[in-house]
Image (cartoon, rainbow, N blue to C red):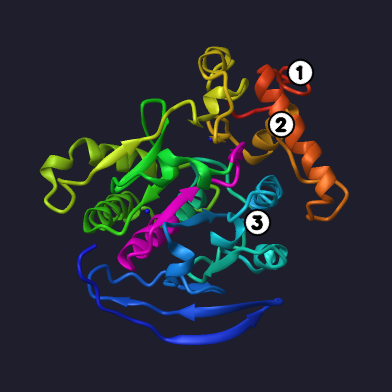
Amino acid sequence: MRNVNVFLCFVLLCYWSIGTKFLYFAPYSLTTNLDVGLSCNVDLNDRSLSQPFIFVMFGTRAFLPLILNWLCNTLLFSGIHNRTVIIVDDYFSSNALSSYNVGLCMTSKLHLNHTGFHYNTFGYWQLVQQRVRIIEYLTALKIPILLFEPDALWVRNPLEDDELMNAEEDLVGFNDDGNFGFGWLRLTTSESVHALMQAVRIQFDKQLQNVVNLDYNHPLSMAGEQHVMVNLLKNRKKEAGFSNITTRMLTECKYLSGKWYDGGRGGNGESVRKKCNGFPVVINNNWIVGNEAKIARAKRWGHWFLPDDLNGTCGSTRFLEGAMYRMRHSIKTAKPFNGPPRQDECPLC
């Protein structure tokens, strides 16, 4: 396991939620008619924050350990946290993250009262649907964003990668088994990008429009947002709104998929590690199912930065430097820190 002319009217209200101050934006878009109910403690239109883009992560309470681990993984990287916005759907997560120097947004459109859903369940796709709507909304606001997943390992600071930073294409993403991956996706403010994300949202909504009265844990198989986007890009010449969208796929060995790892659904990863034998920028922890499996694999490889005994804080600089050394050593040797995967590491794989 980022623009048609838009008139936006905002109603600004301030309130406090469990120690975290949020500005509430109630948007009314003449183009998308989307109200995604975002409450943020930063101004997403602040160009000092969004140039050249804002890092945007979506999270739930179930993802909280992975989010905290990413915060510790990147704490020593310059310029990352203060240009990152984490979008959550519950007060518990917002409170747990409030001590970090990141922007926080909460969506009021989901009231699922959940601690996580399995992949391919109705509740899981409800969460993805809201994510897709927020992405369209951000592109309508002409906010440049880079979408990423909380399970990803950041080996180097992407702000120091010229390929990423100097890319001029509308859509820039990583190579996920030959297709653009949704887990590392830079989107500019172009009209083509907004038209594409609007089309992704419309097609995704159509899949769910006749699905009603299901329990959130009810199994439901459907095309995910990445699959929808990839198919739209393949047929872009038929779409007036984004027929001329420009794209770039980043160098595979710098922005890796979870096929670099062993375990999961991506094989043993040996051929990828042999091919990409340097230090990448990012390794996505996908091609594996379930948060517990992602965490187990990260810990086994020495790619875990969150101390077990400090209640969600990152520990000392010395501790983090040691964790970074352990991580780099595992990549240099292409060997996991704690041996091969156990048979029960990923029960759903």
Amino acid type assigned to the residue bearing label 1 in the image = Gly
Magenta includes 58? no
Select label 3 or label 1 by which is in front.
1
> Residue shown at 41%/86% (left/top)?
11
Question: Mark 3: which secondary structure?
Answer: helix
CB contact under 8 Å: marks 2 and 3 = no
The spot of residue 258 in percent (x, y) is 54, 29
Question: Mark 1: which secondary structure?
Answer: loop
Select label 1 or label 2 by which is in front.
2
- Residue 276 appears left or right of 72: left
Q: Earlier in the sequence, mark 2 or mark 3?
A: 3
> Magenta region: which residues?
130-156
> Residue shown at 51%/87% (left/top)?
13
Query: In what quadrant of the picture does the C terminus appear?
Result: top right
Measure how far apart labels 1 and 2 are at the Cα level.
14 Å
Amino acid type assigned to the residue bearing label 2 in the image = Met
- Residue 105 appears left or right of 193: right
Measure how far apart labels 2 and 3 are at the Cα level.
26 Å
CB contact under 8 Å: marks 1 and 2 = no
Amino acid type assigned to the residue bearing label 3 in the image = Arg
The spot of residue 99 in percent (x, y) is 72, 66
Q: Earlier in the sequence, mark 1 or mark 2?
A: 2
Q: Circle 2: is it few (<14), some (14-19), or many (20+) Cα within 10 Å? A: many
Is residue 223 something one can see in this rendering? no
Residue assigned mark 3: 61
The spot of residue 91 in percent (x, y) is 65, 69
Q: Earlier in the sequence, mark 3 or mark 1?
A: 3
In this view, the residue in front, 128 or 100, is 100
Magenta includes 143? yes
Give me the disc on residue 339.
1
